[in-house]
Amino acid sequence: MRPLHQKILLLGLLALLMGAWIYRTSQQRQLERSREEIGKARQEIRVISQMKALWDRKDLGEKLDHLVHTLPESTLKRYEKKRHRADLALEHLEGKRLNAFLRGLSVLPIQIVSLSIAREGKVYRLECRCKW
């Protein structure tokens, strides 16, 4: 074989080797990305199943009842609870009571569908719809 042919063959083999190396590293990156995506999906499934377990608890309605009934009766305008939904309207709330109620509401594992807070002078009016 001539030296020129050997050099061409060597360059061809080197190019083939570089192509194989580039393909291998790209496949490794793709595999790592897919593993990360699978890990994230598993984590999301875990979180969703934990939330489902929290939402299926029977005492959520009772805890919401307890939270609402800690407020004075004069502030309670409307409180309707049906199955896994609640509709609530409060009037003449002082700032401290409003903050305490919202803190207690935020601790419960419920989904707040709508929340409206309006200030009327020194007192507040709150309307809330939530579900669990």
Image: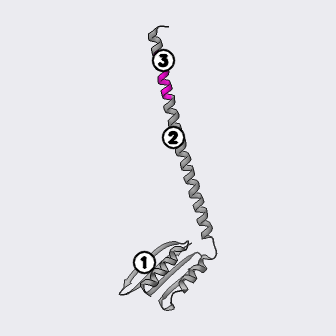
Horizontal side of residue 49 vs 119, given as left or right? right
What is the three-letter code of the residue carrying label 2? Arg
Q: Main secondary structure of the magenta part?
A: helix
Residue most toward the bottom?
74
The residue beneath circle 2 is 29
> Mark 1 or mark 3, which is nearer the start of the sequence?
3
What percent of the width, then of the height, locates residue 131? 54, 73
What is the three-letter code of the residue carrying label 1? Ser
Q: Which residues make up the magenta segment?
A: 8-19
Residue mark closest to the camera, 3 vs 1: 3
Characterize the local packing of mark 1: few (<14), some (14-19) or many (20 or more) Cα atoms within 10 angstroms. Answer: few
Q: CA distance from mark 2 to mark 3?
A: 29 Å
Q: How many badges with numbers are in the image?
A: 3
Residue most toward the right?
58
Viewer-proximal residue among 61 and 101? 101
Give the numbered dot on residue 10: 3
Choose top left, top right, bottom left or bottom right for residue 99: bottom left
Characterize the local packing of mark 3: few (<14), some (14-19) or many (20 or more) Cα atoms within 10 angstroms. Answer: few
Secondary structure of residue under mark 2: helix
The residue beneath circle 1 is 116
Secondary structure of residue under mark 1: strand
